[in-house]
Amino acid sequence: MNRIYATLVLFSTFCIACPAHADLKELYTSSYVCRDQEGNPRWEATAKIRHKQGDVYNIIETAKGRYFGFDGEISWVAEMDFEETEDTVRPLKMKRSFFDKHGKLIMFFEQDFSFDDNVVTCMHEDLIKNTSKKKKFKFTKDIINRLLLGVYVKKFIDEGQVSKSIQLVSPEPGFYNLEIRIVNAEEIKINGQNVNAYKLCLDPQLGLLSFVKVFLPKAYAWHSAEPPFEWLKYEGVENSVNSPEVKIVKQE
């Protein structure tokens, strides 16, 4: 088994088993809860990651609760394939679907990553408003989305890196430059246990527009300071620059 997936925990991957992928080798399962800044629960999730073939892996996610941009309680399911290379991981294709409290599909979006021309194509369908969006973004650095963030940072630490500029594609759809850097090592409490962790900053990089960074708050993630550098906690915006700041914590 590849070392990066031995005991993998994802930051934004909330999964359940899918019959269509029952033949895939399961590598890791995790769960976590999202709360607002006052500590009130917003949603809960579980995650599975499985080996598909060669260096390609599959994420299936599911979650239920309250989520920015929707009225009332909803659920969502996402699936993404990604590839591990020698020194990083990169997304291949992702689809995420949202359902109302009755289980009716109300929105979905897709992201298709082409590394032949370094273009990500984003499709966004709102079935309630009957609107559709399609955007393409040219990436020039490592590219990730929310589903891949925890996996990417784990590999980043495992490779001994302390700072790196990357690009993020978000649900709006949007496209942002980020710097990931290790801030320090500190002891944090997770589920009543003290754990030594690396604190990482996810800092928006806006170039000449840096004066508006006040509107794009930094996010922070904590990973175990010991191999396999598993994800422990996240604090930052929920899904896009306009969404509320939340805290997402790994559960036992």
Image (tube, rainbow, N blue to C red):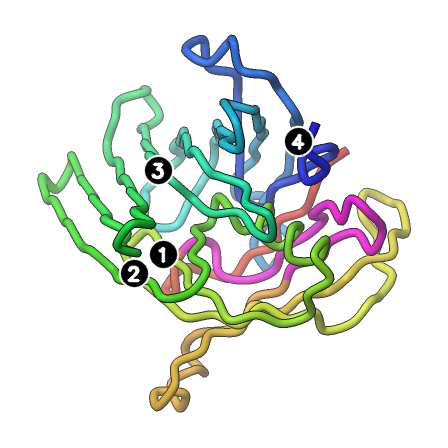
CB under 8 Å between discs 1 and 3: no
Residue 237 is situated, as x and y percent measured from the top left of the image, at 49, 61
Tell me if residue 46 comes above or below residue 10 in the rendering: above
Residue drawn at (47%, 31%) of the image: 64
- Quadrant where the C terminus is found in the figure: top right
Between the C-alphas of marks 4 and 3, the distance is 22 Å
Task: Residue under label 2, please give it.
Answer: 174
| Chain-order first, disc 4 or disc 3 | 4
Dot in front, 4 or 1: 1
Q: What amino acid is at disc 2? A: Gly
Task: Residue under label 3, please give it.
Answer: 93
Q: What amino acid is at disc 4? A: Ser
Where disc 1 sits, the SS reads: strand
**Which residue reaches farthest left?**
130
Task: Residue under label 4, please give it.
Answer: 30
Q: What amino acid is at disc 1? A: Val
Where disc 4 sits, the SS reads: strand
Q: What amino acid is at disc 3? A: Lys
Q: Which residues are magenta?
A: 221-239
